[in-house]
Amino acid sequence: MGIVSEEEAIDELQKLINQVEGPLKKTFERVHQGYLRENLSRFLKARDWNVSKAHTMLLDCLRWRVDSEIDSILSKPIVPSELYRDVRDSQLIGMSGYTREGLPVFAIGVGLSTFDKASVHYYVQSHIQINEYRDRVLLPSMSKKNGRPITTCVKVLDMTGLKLSALSQIKLVTIISTIDDLNYPEKTNTYYVVNAPYIFSACWKVVKPLLHERTTKKVHVLSGSGKDELLKIMDYTSLPHFCRRGSSGSSHHTQSVDCFSVDHPFHQQLYSYVKHHYETQGQGEPAKQGSFHVGFPEPGADGVQIAKTIESEMHKSENCNGLGKPVDDRTVGP
């Protein structure tokens, strides 16, 4: 009532959050990393600048972090290393570089991720570790380097191989996306969809109306591998490997920069960081097994509806001609 600007909304939320004490205050410091107002604005954006709703959302996030011990997740390696390799081989995500503005570029193999080599807890643990490493290591480092707050990333979603069998992954994907929506809101500046087959086109047309306009504005479906468009915002060296198709260079070179691979520098640095922080606690070698269990939020009604819609549309498209053929940005709008 009386709040007439975004800056005033941030001021109001800051007054409310200044009242938290103890573990909630400590974990919030992990969240904002010194960029308090930028992080308060994320929660406000996620709740359409309603201060009361943003305050509730932020408190729920902080309680989740404390209850699930998220602050210590970067000292909980997935072991043994073979299991970590299995997770990386079946949960295709990596960081390929940075945009020219300094935003990390995360690549996600939506179509070829199988999530079939470990329990759901390991996949959730891995996803949250990447989120936390991004927020507590990469973004602060880039903010310092660029002399301004950098608090978001871009994601390039590779739809290669997307097919009906992906239905078996919807529950896990919904869990992960719900964790992100509730606890890491507005961390992605733009989503670029590449190598989209017909089935994605069919699903996107029915799912898009169910999404918030704030979300759909972030999604850009690019023609083919998206290389030409992505080169407008990043250098070639930061392109995900699956966007380099049609470029000169041997196939061996393309494979050597596969950002999904456990051998990619990003994953090696992340794993070494987590293992180092475990060892500095004086606990010796990590246990051979035992995932880091995180409380799973119940997907909201919107999330359930979207999952059901995708499932229905993929069934409809099962026998469609050209199911695996890429589409271009003339047939799938952002």
Image: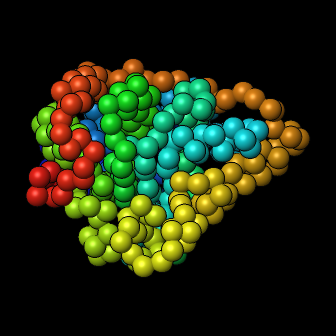
Residue 114 x/y as whole percent: 48, 36
Q: Residue at x 37, y 30 (%)?
A: 165
Q: Residue at x 42, y 61 (%)?
A: 242
Residue 65 x/y as whole percent: 54, 33
Give the camera-side residue of 68 and 323: 323
Visible in this render: residue 289? yes
Q: In this picture, is 223 found above or below 9?
A: below
Give the camera-side residue of 168 and 50: 168
Quarter of image, res 210: top left
Residue 11 x/y as whole percent: 31, 50
Q: Residue at x 18, y 39 (%)?
A: 321
Residue 207 x/y as whole percent: 18, 35
Visible in this render: residue 150? no
Question: In the shown orientation, is residue 33 left or right of residue 76?
Answer: left
Question: In the shown orientation, is residue 218 left or right of residue 104?
Answer: left
Quarter of image, res 80: top right
Q: Residue at x 20, y 53 (%)?
A: 327
